[in-house]
Amino acid sequence: MAHRPFDPKHPAYPGGGRSTAILTLRIDGQDVGARSGDTILKVARENEIHIPTLCHLEGLSSLGACRLCLVEVTGAARLMPACVTAVRQDMEVTTRSERLQAYRRKLLELFFSERNHVCAVCVSNGHCELQTLAETLGMTHVRYDYLYPPDAIDASHHRFSVDHNRCILCLRCVRACEEIEGAHTWDVMGRGIEARVITDLNQPWGESESCTGCGKCVQVCPTGALTEKGRAVAEMVKNKEFLPYLRVMRRREF
Amino acid sequence: MMLDEINAIAQRQREKEESFRHRIDVCIAAGCLSSHSDDIVAAFEKEIARRGLEKSCRAKGVGCLGLCAAGPLVAVEPAGTLYRGVAAGDVGEILDALASSPPARLHCPRETPFFQRQLKIVLENCGRIDPESIEEYIAAGGYQAMHTALTRMSPDEVIREVARSGLRGRGGAGFPTGLKWSTVAKAENATKFVVCNADEGDPGAFMDRSVLESDPHRIIEGMVIAGWAVGATRGFIYVRAEYPLAVKRVKSALAAAERSGLLGGSLFHTPFGFDIKVRLGAGAFVCGEETALIASIEGRLGRPRPRPPYPAESGLWGCPTLINNVETFANIAPILRNGSGWFAGIGTEKSKGTKVFALAGRVRNTGLIEVPMGTSLRDIVFAIGGGIKDDRGFKAAQTGGPSGGCIPEQHLDLPIDYDSLAAVGSIMGSGGMIIMDETACMVDVAKYFMAFCRAESCGACVPCRVGTTQLHRLLDRITAGRGAATDLARIEDLCDLVKTTSLCGLGQTAPNPVLSTLRYFRDEYEAHIQGRRCPAGVCKL
């Protein structure tokens, strides 16, 4: 195609291709600037406003599923998930209120009641995002029944193991495997409370033919559900820094 | 296909029908068919042939005649005589009575409130035409509205007409149809889609199934008009695989419409073309939620995603997509045929037209009914429904399925429309209506619906996945006589959490049956907890 240097939107034009509209909004009473298309979560984090998240991870697609990042938007009938809600001009967002914090604590309690989250004997004790959130949000007890599902551990892989007792179904492993590694070893089986993450067609992980053994799923897992073998209690520290790096390296914008 | 061809088909078909002195219509929708009404058609044909009456008498299968409780039903036209509980062995007796009065044993009088109090728009052809015959649909005025829309109206005019009619989405939420159409029409994209949501899944609901089984061409016509209005050239009918008969009839209707040039390229010699494909749901209730439905059609896991963006902006494969319910599409052709003013003259101020209900539960006349919006619940239960079976007392009407609520006796005079139902803590829903008498335990009913939501939750978000499980446990404990005094407060707190924080409509409305029974039948909960007894005698405490 012919070069069109005078089109300010053309990528070859200085500043071209970046004609994104800039808008302003207010988060927790603070005036902030944003690019159109940004999410509330992204803008909040840029401005050091902390919104708790669990299923969200920079570098992966967003689900809006854990509901911890729900925020109040003035004029909206419902609470909105900050990780997938786009900012609008003059939006008024509240990320912290007594009501929101109470909902977040209750949601965390539901997570803890769902499977067998026993921090004291967990390899991720002290390095667990669920545990950290419970501490920062002041969740001191669980008011719901512990469901104690009889879940198994699959340690058939030679380097990693999956403990469904610690899984919170954030699906980071599923997304990392499909979107970053491209293997799509992980997926979900079952519905509702019966849902479980599975490898291939619910075969033992060690027998998976699609798994490349890259370990990205392990590193993105927020809890002690996916771990490297050979770690004792509190020894499993995860490293997620590779994700944004891979994302940047794979961009095709140059 | 041109208009004169359509008119010629209609003319031929009418003349053919009028050549018979007696026309015997046997209901072959799923309800009567399950009582082997197809054998009755065969028996009639055999007996007519045996008596040599082929010239003056014909028998055929038609769609739902409505009064399912009395099935299998047979109607004899033009006399208008209706027979109930017919078996294949009765055909001789009915043929004998063609010239005289019908035998009392089989006669089902049509002068009863069940038939007189209804107003049929969506169901106008149900029980009148053979669902597998495109000629009969055309003879009943079919495809005229599509011709008018495509050849004499601009897309904007069609949308204005639908908007002026005041039609609201019949899937349950009642979103204004004209507004939805104009949103999709305004979206700028070369590719757009029209989707018919036929993933009817509420317990006790069978409106969409009956329409698809009885009058499938009506949906096709509505979808093509919608495609013209919003600028889409491809459509999908998403129907659950548990409806094999509806699937079969829809597929045969699609094939017939394609053969007749009423689907495909350059319809009525205009540049506009439209195609429709059928996609089957694999049994997940949540796939009736529009974003999960989209994921399912795309071949992905049937799980909802947060909205916005709404499908009108980004739907199937990221393209603007119009999603309407079966009954909504079924209203389109009549609106264009008779004018928006006619439609807007029916119903209440904010809810126009009629609503189809699947009347089920403890009423005498269970079946498929269509009434003007604003009809009172009392009329539906006691006039049309014929009152409660076994002369028991009315207790509650459940509308809206697992997303709705239970309406108690004190609201029996409520005019049924979207807003009045919402005001008493229920919803219109897609049209399931289950009538309960005094033998129903409302805690048990709430537990039943919570078990349904728990099993049908997709599991994507934690409040729905774990919240419905916890709610079900609490309700289960109460019905087992192990409820604690604090449990009601815990239930209310949890209901608020699930309602407020769930990702999609399933979770956001899952607490409704619990909240509405707590609102009107709190004493029953308290009797279970404090008195350790079930007032209705249902729960084993």
Image: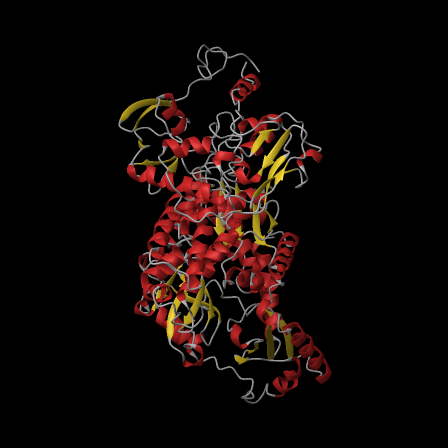
In the picture provided, is B534 more to the left or to the right than B330?
Answer: left
Residue B173 image point, x, y percent: 41, 52
Q: Where is residue B174 in the image (x, y as percent from the top left)?
A: 39, 53
On screen, residue B234 above or below B480: above
Would you identify the image quadrant in which residue B409 lies? bottom left
**On the rendered image, what quadrant is the C terminus of chain A found in?**
top right
The color scheme shown is secondary structure
Q: Can residue B412 be seen in this view?
A: yes
x and y percent of residue A177 in the render? 60, 30
Relative placement, left or right, of A249 versus B508 is: right
Residue B233 visible? The answer is no
Residue nearest the viewer, comparing A237 with A85: A237
Closest to the observer: A158 or B82?
Answer: A158
Furthest residue in direction right, as rendered: B50
The percent position of residue B339, horizontal first and vertical second, equals: 41, 57
> Is residue B387 shown above or below A77?
below
Would you place residue B94 above or below residue B460 in this image?
Answer: below
Residue drawn at (46%, 11%) of the image: A6
Q: Splitting the image into 4 quarters, where does residue A39 fall?
A: top left
Marker count (numbered)? 0
Query: Is the N terminus of chain A in the top left, top right, bottom left or bottom right quadrant?
Result: top right
Report the residue that reaches farthest toward the left. Answer: A29
Q: Nearer the viewer, residue B293 or B323?
A: B293
